[in-house]
């Protein structure tokens, strides 16, 4: 089968198409004939071996697949790597049937980024009716869904940040009340101004560095900053307990892997997201479709912030 494999850690240049044997059938696992695989920012960290979990070589990256099982079911599933291949082995309980009317790209946008957006708001931030929500990288895969879900969950004001005018316009089309520039310089003041002069209740942050610092400074008393990535690869300044106590603020970390296997934290939110997509209440954004052989280009585009929405590897090309 065709697959993308790495035999050394590094940047996009280490991603190479190869021929590999198909994975063996094992108890508790499904073989999926992959029609499309998702590309995540976390994949770029996996390829560098700079992610929260360590990787071993050789490695086929990719944590999201959609395709057919041997009995003909169309499923979307999380994979423990191995997704950038024509055949993937996934755990039974991580495969979810895809309803009619939901495309490959939409399903792939939900399985990591949709679930992440859902849990950022519901589980980590514990959003309450009327609260203000800042969504950084609001045109990205997770951000574009978080904007929509925040409105659906009753946010009073959704403030989007994005790096270009086109991306800010997309965030507004998806339901953000206001969109501001993502530059870290002056970020705190822009967020407060965008919230009518008041500090904000919730920030969903995945950039790190000075954007994290500015976001924390913009939090109102009892505000929550949920951090779920470090796209800038620059760590924020250390957070001291007094900084949190002095304004009754919270910093909450989130990693989707901790939801897997916990009752109610995977299948139920996934079913809700798929149902919302099938009936048009949620519109996952597909930002780019690449042939499998162009996986390195997909990583380059993602890292350079040239993309929006969900990036897909098409196994038929």
Image (cartoon, helix red, strand yellow):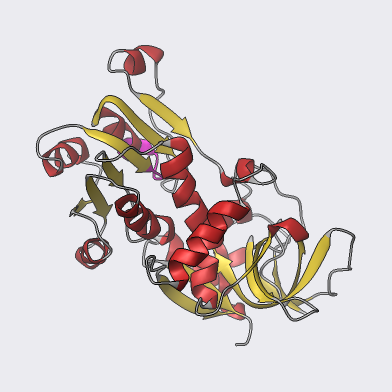
Q: Please tell me whether residue 185 is drawn above or below residue 116 in the rendered image.
A: above
| Residue 315 falls within the magenta-colored stretch | no
Where, by quadrant of the figure, is residue 271 drawn?
A: bottom right
Relative to residue 97, is residue 117 drawn left or right? left
Relative to residue 312, is residue 120 drawn left or right? left
Q: 187 or 253, which lies in front?
A: 253
Residue 63 percent across, percent down from the top left: 64, 60
Residue 308 percent across, percent down from the top left: 37, 66
Quadrant for the C terminus in the image: bottom right
Q: Which residue is drawn at 36% across and 34% down?
A: 225
Q: Please tell me whether residue 39 is drawn above or below residue 158 in the rendered image.
A: below
Range covered by the magenta-colored residues: 205-211
Q: Residue at x 79, y 79 (%)?
A: 71
Q: 43 or 258, which lies in front?
A: 258
Quadrant for the N terminus in the image: bottom right
Looking at the rendered structure, the number of numbered marks drawn on it comes to: 0
Q: Please tell me whether residue 171 is drawn above or below residue 184 in the rendered image.
A: below
Relative to residue 242, is residue 122 drawn left or right? right
Is residue 11 something that shows in the picture?
no
Q: Which residue is drawn at 89% across and 68% down?
A: 24
Residue 46 percent across, percent down from the top left: 62, 53
Q: Which residue is drawn at 84% across and 69% down?
A: 23
Q: In the current view of this chain or complex, which residue is farthest to the bottom? A: 317
């Amino acid at each position: 089968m065709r697959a993308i494999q790495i035999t050394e850690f590094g940047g996009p240049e280490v991603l190479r198409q190869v021929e590999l044997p198909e994975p063996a059938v094992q108890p508790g696992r499904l073989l999926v004939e992959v029609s499309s695989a998702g590309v995540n920012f976390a994949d770029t960290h996996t390829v560098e071996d700079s992610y929260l979990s360590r990787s071993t070589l050789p490695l086929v990256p990719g944590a999201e697949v959609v395709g057919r099982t041997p009995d003909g079911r169309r499923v979307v599933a999380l994979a423990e790597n191995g997704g950038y291949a024509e055949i993937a082995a996934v755990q039974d309980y991580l495969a979810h049937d895809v309803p009619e009317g939901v495309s490959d790209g939409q399903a792939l946008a939900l399985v990591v980024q949709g679930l992440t957006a859902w849990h950022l708001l519901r589980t980590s931030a514990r959003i309450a009716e009327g609260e203000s929500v800042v969504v950084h990288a609001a045109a990205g895969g997770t951000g574009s869904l978080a904007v929509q879900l925040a409105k659906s969950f009753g946010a009073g004001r959704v403030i989007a940040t994005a790096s270009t005018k086109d991306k800010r316009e997309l965030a507004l089309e998806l339901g953000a009340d206001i969109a501001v520039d993502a530059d870290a310089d002056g970020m705190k003041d822009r967020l407060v101004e965008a919230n009518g002069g008041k500090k904000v209740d919730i920030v969903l942050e995945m950039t790190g560095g000075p954007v994290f610092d500015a976001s924390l400074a913009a939090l109102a008393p009892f505000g929550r900053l949920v951090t779920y990535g470090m796209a800038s690869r620059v760590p924020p300044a250390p957070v001291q307990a007094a900084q949190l106590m002095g304004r009754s603020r919270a910093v909450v970390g989130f990693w989707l892997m901790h939801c897997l296997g916990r009752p109610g934290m995977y299948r139920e939110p996934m079913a809700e997201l798929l149902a919302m997509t099938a009936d048009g209440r949620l519109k996952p954004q597909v930002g780019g479709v690449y042939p499998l052989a162009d996986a390195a280009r997909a990583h380059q585009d993602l890292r350079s912030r040239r993309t929006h929405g969900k990036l897909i590897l098409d196994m038929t090309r």
